[in-house]
Amino acid sequence: MERVDDCDPRILYSPPGAWHIEGAAAEYNHTSHGSRNVPADLTFQFNGTYIGVYGTLGPLVKGESDPVDLYILDNQPAVSYTGPALRLDIVQYSQRMYSSPKLQDGLHTLILRRTSQTSVTWVDFIEFMPSSAESPTATSSVNSSQVATPATSSASVTATTIEQTKNGESRPALSPGVIAAIVVPCGVLLVSLALLIGYWRKQRRGGVASQAPEGSIADETAERQQTSVERTNI
């Protein structure tokens, strides 16, 4: 059940100036709207299945009569309310002045219409049963749909990412482990190849150096022998 204070902007008072605000400590939120004018209407729209109007009944002043008000719900035949006769020193608060039957769930309009200029009507608050569309069950359904939405969005993002990868022909970057597995063997191979080339060059130079002395000695010996022969012939 939802309670609506008489000062709530959802309650419309007409015509302008026909109602005034007063209040007492025992009233809801310490305020009430009163009127002794005709015409004077109160209009309230709501979505729900029940509505009740509560007010303050005070002692009659000389020349006044008990309030006689009409309550018109959804343009149906009016329901009349006549306040009880009270002693001059009695004030009753939170008195129910109108109560609707169980209504079909939906939008409804209630009008309070004053009919007597010799009485005063005091409205304190309205209570109504909200529509089932505003119930916790409906809220749970909304929450469930909201929870399911991120998964759909995630799938859409994933599909979009895959499509962009195909169209852009992009590839994922190699991990550090894969890079190391490629670079290290290549480095070892290059070092080994460099060492092998260096060793081969060293061996080649060594072979040339070892052959050179032998050639020099043979040439020198042949030269000496030729010189000796020439001397003998002389």
Image (spheres, rainbow, N blue to C red):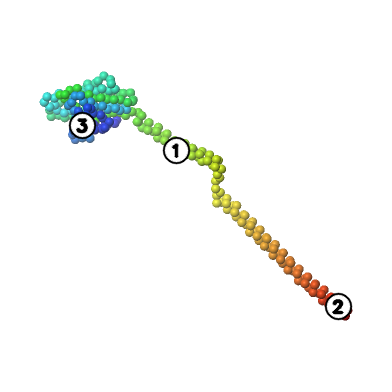
Q: Residue furthest front?
A: 234
Mark 3: amino acid: Ser
Mark 3 surroundings within 10 Å by alpha-carbon count, few (fewer than 14), some (14 through 19), many (20 or more): many
Image-quadrant location for residue 26: top left
* Residue at x 31% of width, y 23% of height: 103
Q: Which mark is residue 32?
A: 3
Q: Is residue 227 above or below residue 3?
A: below
Q: Which mark sits nearer the N-terminus, 3 or 1?
A: 3
Q: Residue furthest top?
A: 77
* Residue at x 47% of width, y 36% of height: 152
Q: Which mark is residue 230?
A: 2
* Residue at x 65% of width, y 60% of height: 194
Mark 1: amino acid: Pro
Percent x, y of residue 33? 20, 30
Q: Which mark is residue 197?
A: none
Q: Which mark sits nearer the N-terminus, 2 or 3?
A: 3
Image-quadrant location for residue 94: top left
Mark 2: amino acid: Glu
Local secondary structure at mark 1: helix
For label 1, the residue is 150
